Each structure stands twice: as C-alpha cells, then as structure tokens.
Image: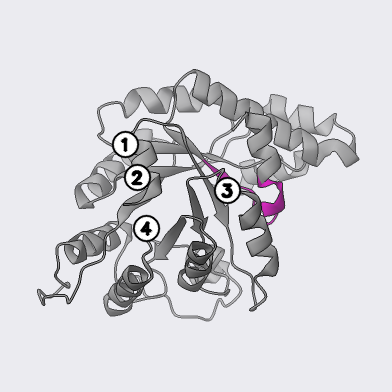
Amino acid sequence: MSLLKEVLERGEFAVTAEMAPPKGIDLNHLMECARAIKGRVHGVNVTDFQSAVMRATSLVTCKLLKDEGLEPVLQMTGRDRNRIAIQGEFLAAGVFGIKNVLSLTGDHTVVGDHPQAKPVYDLDSVGILQTATIMMDGKDLVGNDLQGTPEFFLGACVTPRFDPVEAQILKMEKKINAGAKFFQTQAVFDIETMREFREKTKHLDTKVLAGIIPLKSAAMAKFMNNNVPGIYVPEELIERMKNTPKEQRVAEGIKIAGEFIQQLREENLCDGVHVMAIGAEENVPAILDAAGL
C-alpha cells in the first residue's frame, strides 16, 4: 500500500515535496536533494514536463527515487500523450511498484520551450483519473483484460483562490467521482483563503494538502500575483521580503513558509502540505525545520 495513503488515512499530517527532473541525464543534484529529505516526507512528486518544458521523464525519475527508498508520486499530464500512451505509462509504473499518481491536464505547449510541439489532450485530468481507476479494476479502456493490475493512490490539483471558488469545488467533485482520493493545491500564502476553502469543502470525502512555495524576493511575489492565476501573496508579506536585506531574503522566505505551515496545522485547515521549492529543492529540509516537521 502507498505510504502517503496510509499516513492520510491514519489522520496524520502528510508532507510531500516536489522535484523537477533536469534537462539532461545528470540527476545527481536531484538525488542528493531527495536523500536529504528521506524519512522526512511521505511522498516526492516528480513533475511531468512542468510548464511544457522538455526534461527527463517523471516515470524514470520516480523509479530512481523508489530505488533510493523514497515514496514517489508520478505526475501524469494529458498534454503529451494519447490514451494508449497514458495506459502504457500506468502499466510501466505498476511494473516498477509506483503507488501514487497525480493527474493533471497540463499547460499548453505554447508556454514551454518547444512552442511548435503539437499538444495531444486526448484525456484531461478527469479522464486520466478514470483511466487509472478502470485499469485498477483489471481492464483497459476498451474492455480488454490486463495480465496483472496496477494499484494506485490517485490525486489531483485544485486552486483554493479561484473566483468563483465554487467552480473549483465542482471540478473537485468530478475528480473525486473519477477516483481522486487526495488533492494538492496551488500555492497558498494567506490563511484566510485556506479558512474559507476548508469550510466550503468540508462536505467532500477527500484529503487536501496545501501548496507551499517559499518566497525568494518581493519581486518574485509581485510576479506571481501578476502572472500566475490563482496565486495571491498578501502585501504584508511583500513588504516583509522587501524590508529584508538581500542576502537574507531566501532565509526569510523559508521562515515565512515555516510559520504558515505551523498555522495551517494549528488551525487544522488541511491534511498536510505540498512543498514546491521551484528550482531550489536543496532548501526543502530547511523549510521542514522551520515548520517543525
């Protein structure tokens, strides 16, 4: 059984961290970062061509993490594969003993480093969840029997700060009906957003891990506010970063992330956290330290 599933079902505070494969075959840095959090997190998400940028695949990186004794979370987007390829990836994940899957529709190729690439989108995030659920029942999408079935703990994404948030909740319900058992959120920086989201989703039978991105500067915060849908960094945090000496800003961002995680736990506003260090995965242990995890 998935470790992440066991922890969430026991009602413990779950911790996952995100790691992006490199653009190349040298995974030494990623593996060093992974070893540094071994035993401290319940899952390591491996991004699937994040932001439509060509990299090493999520599947091979998940296999390497599993061989190191970590709990990988395979991310699967619908942008780059048709339903045949998605099913093949799921079978391969099953062969490797990978137990966790996060379903994503995927950013369009025009935002990535190969804008001329043709997107597929044969299945969206709901369709990917439905596919995995059918395969766990021993069939493929056209009803053929599988010779051995994979076992997955299925997850999806949600954006708590969305207007109207009810639209996101409707999508959550569809994803839950398709098989999602947990959700990782878009990055959240203000506690009121999570209070409101927790209240509006309390009727749903699912687990929610709040997304955590450590700030590196006031400019980063402003950029996300202006360019990343669903992210809102409060002005007080922007001022706090702005008033911090330049050489101390990374440490201050880590401190802010730790304080926020502690508040989320104290108010029981989520079932865990998903830490996204975005290119600074070596800082994840310090974030966990700051949060007392």
Q: Residue 5 carries which label?
A: 2
In the picture of the structure, the residue carrying the numbered disc 4 is 101
Marks 2 and 1 close (CB-CB < 8 Å): yes
In the picture of the structure, the residue carrying the numbered disc 3 is 228
Q: Distance between the Cα atoms at labels 3 and 4?
A: 24 Å
Q: Is residue 279 above or below residue 49?
A: above
In this orientation, which residue lies closer to the viewer: 66 or 77?
66
Figure quadrant of the C terminus: top right
Callout 3 environment at 10 Å: few (<14), some (14 to 19), or many (20+)? few
Marks 3 and 4 close (CB-CB < 8 Å): no
- Three-letter amino acid code at disc 4? Val
Q: In this view, does 168 lie above or below 38?
A: above
Callout 4 environment at 10 Å: few (<14), some (14 to 19), or many (20+)? many
- Three-letter amino acid code at disc 2? Lys
In the picture of the structure, the residue carrying the numbered disc 1 is 9
Q: Is residue 116 above or below residue 106?
A: below
Give x and y (percent) for residue 71.
46, 55
The residue at 55%/53% (across/down) is 18
- Three-letter amino acid code at disc 1? Glu
On the rendered structure, is 223 left or right of 201?
right
- Three-letter amino acid code at disc 3? Val
On the rendered structure, is 282 left or right of 38?
right
Give x and y (percent) for residue 256.
69, 30
Mark 3 vs mark 4, foreground winner is: 4
